[in-house]
Structures are given as structure tokens and as C-alpha cells.
Amino acid sequence: MIQANSFIGRQEEINLLEKYYSSDKSEFVAVYGRRRVGKTYLVRSTLSDRFDFEFSGMYQVAAKLQRREFQKALDQRSGLKGRLPSDWFDAFDHLKSYLLALGKERVVVFLDELPWMDTQKSNFLAALSSFWNGWHEKTILKLFVCGSATTWMVNRLIGDQGGLYGRISRAIYLAPFNLLETREYLNQIQDMNFDNRQVLETYMIFGGIPYYLDMLDNELPLSVNVDNLLFAENAPLRTEYEFLFRSLFKGSVNYRRVVELLSTKLTGLTREDIAKETDLTGGELTKVLSNLELCDFIRSYSAPQKKERNKTYQLTDMFSLFYLRFISKGSGQDEHYWTKSAESGKKNAWSGYAFEQVCLHHLSQIKQKLGISGILSNAYAWNLKSYTDLDGNLWEGAQIDLIIDRSDRVMNLCEMKYSQDEYVIDKGYADTLRARAETFRRHEKCRKNLRCTFVTLYGVKNNRYSNIVDDQIQLDDLFN
């Protein structure tokens, strides 16, 4: 069994894998999550010494070739030479015969990249269903599967309405690292010796994705690492964005169109706005938005009183945001681009938005600092476009990036500010904050107590205007 101190985070997931391995009945466990998040590593690190069979699907490889490799893996395990399976039903019959021949009390099978095995007209899912449903042997079968194509895992496997309906013992979602786990990974595994500010900057580019973090060289500054991984000629992550979408979604063009549109409208767009800009409508747009959200590329939100169709969608995947802002349009032609752009306006604008997204990824830490973890709350953004009402009153446009609407009749109106030092509030900005809160109160007919809340790196500088701030959260608080 893996000890907690030999693995960064994931202890809850490790405990679940061990629990379902140790039970006294057959179990079917599906691990899913964003590509590169560490699903395969998690399962192998926890259980590989107990595998009786392991196979990984191959990207865009025909079913016949996949079955041939499947049989080769069986032959290597058994030491025998089996015939090539005629179809997936035949392949799983071979697997069953091999497992039963072991004469063990329990057998463990790990199938990785399961969606890539489900090629067109291969009947893979039906064969897998037949294999699992037909297992009525005294030998206990532990079947663990992984897949990066989250939409396939959720809709086709976990949510299957056919032969596998209700058959999954446990679905385990593997999320990216949070800031604390990222710091532990960088400093304990990678020996980077980063402080919290450097960890934040790393997170704003790569997110909490272990595969990307593992590529950092501890002998180089972060800026040089970014240049080497993303901007240099033949940089290893230069083509990662395109591959992510090709490998995750069939018909990935529409998914990219939506993500690339949202990257230009950082405050987010409604479904109606997205439909106008992309010409996607109806079921296709619903599918694209739903699948992007499942795969952690975007988030949706709406105020409680708003209708479902008025949801706003935002790009939240840190790596995609960085790629689309700095690389896809040719900005990255200079192999030292990131090192040279230290204080550029474009970088500063991106930093502000990226920090907002990091805060949204750490809402639980913000609530903990506010002391409201045990209070029921709803988090959303609010946006008002300028308009004249029926009484002729002009309403000026206003926007609040994060509202924490609490059941104790309090609302935290949150400002998230990225700055090199303590954040300074001047008279003009203090007046803006008061006017914005008053506009929100009047327009939404809000009777709750509104608290001005700032999330910053180093706090708000104490001056004659800083008393407008009721609550403060600093960078270090996001690492709890």
C-alpha cells in the first residue's frame, strides 16, 4: 500500500482504490478526469504489483490492431501463444480463460485509455459489458479502468443506459492539484524550492496538472522553463493544446471554436452570445458546452433568480488560457518571449484574469478564511449592461466577478486583485466600489448585508480609503 508521504495529494482516491480492491466481491471502478492529470499513475502506483492483466488503448488505431496488441499482452502474461481474436467478444473470452486459469481467489485487471479502444463499429462497449455481466465465477474480479476522454467516460460508460447500466461500483473523479498540492509537488518531488508567489505563477500557466509540472527543470528559473517548454523551437508543449482537443473530442473543431471565442471574452458569454458568434445551435451547442464543462475547460454560472438559458460561460482551464493568449496567434515566435515580457501590458492583463481564475478554483479556501465553510452559500458572478428602464431611469453597467451569497443573510462582493505589492485603493476606486454595491442592491432589490471583500497577494495597503474593505484574503490563505 502507498504511504501518504510518498504521494502528493490523492490520499482519498488511494483509499478508495484500496477499499474496492479489498472488498469480498467483484468490483468495477472507473477513474476519470482531465488528460495529463495523473489517472494512470495513480492506479499503477497503488495497485500495479497486484495486476494480473494490464492493457492501454491506442489513439486512432484500428480495432483489429488494438486486439492484436491486446492478445500480445495476454501472451506475455501467460507465456503461451494465442490466436488473434476475431472481435472484442473473442478477445474478452481469451482474457476470461486466462484469468480463471490462474486459479487465484481474486484477479485484478487494469484497462487504460478505455475510450480509445471503442473505435467505430468495433462493438467494444458491448463486449466489455458482456465480459463484466457474464462474470459469475467464484473468482473475484477487480476491474479498474481509466480514460482521459471524460465525456466518453461519463456518458458512454458511467452513464450507460444499456448493458452496463448501474454496473459501475465506483466512479472516481481525479481533479487537478490545488495550490497547496502544487507547492508540495514542485518542492518535494521536483525540488524547485519555490515560494508561494512562484507557485502561483506556475499554477497560472500550467494549472495543477502533474504532467506539466513534472517537465520543469529545477536548475532553471521559471521564466526560462516556460520559454523552453512553450516558446522555443520544437518546444515539447507547443502542440499540446491541439492534441488535447483531438484526443478528447470527436469533431473537436466546434469545441475549439467555443474555447477560443471564450478566450477573447474573459468576463464570459451567454449561450445566446456563443450561438451568434459560432453558428452552433440546439443540441450540438448543448453537447459542446456540457462536454467542455465536464472536462474542466469551462465553467458556467448564473444568479439564482436567472433562468437556465441565461447562464454565463467562462474559460477556466489555465493552460488553454495561457496558450491562446500568448502562443496561438504567433506571439511566441521569439524563443525567449516569456523572459523578455516581464512587465508587458499584455502579461499584466493576463495575470489579473488568471489570478481571478485561480481564486475561483479555490473557493473552499476563501470560504474557510472567511469562517463560513459551514454556512450554505452559492457563488456566482453578476453583470449588468447599461439600459433605460420603463420609468426612464438610466442604469449604468456594472460587474462583480464573484459574489458569495450566504444563507445567513450576508453577501460577500469579492474583488480579486493581482499586484506586485500591497494593493492601493484610491478615492476614485473607493467611489466606484460604493457605487457598484449600491447599483447591485437597488437593481437586485437586495436586503442582505453586503460586505466588500478583497482577495489579493499581499493585502490592501492601509490608507484613508482602505476602510471600505470589510474582509481580506491573501495569497497564503489560498494554500490552506
Image (cartoon, grey):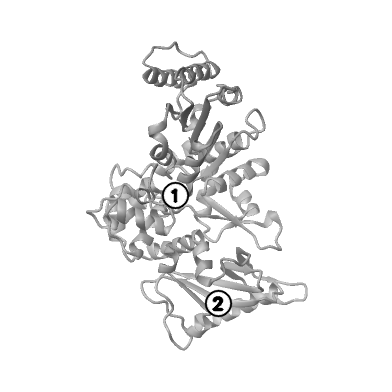
Q: Residue under circle 1? A: 11
Q: Residue 376: image x %, image y %? A: 63, 65
> On the picture, is 190 further left or further right than 370?
left
Element carrying mark 1? helix
Q: As drawn, which residue projects farthest toward the right?
A: 391
- Callout 2: helix, strand or loop? strand
- The mark found on residue 452 in the picture is 2
Which residue sits at x=68%, y=70%? 387
Q: Is residue 417 above or below residue 243?
A: below
Q: Going from the N terminus, do you reach mark 2 or mark 1 first? A: 1
The Cα–Cα distance between marks 2 and 1, rounded to whole angstroms, is 36 Å
Assess disc 1: are there few (<14), some (14-19) or many (≥20) residues with their C-alpha within 10 Å of its C-alpha.
some
| Direction from residue 468 to residue 450 in the image, left or right | right
Q: Which residue lies furthest to the left in this view?
A: 219
Disc 2 to disc 1: CB gap under 8 Å: no
Quadrant for the N terminus in the image: top left
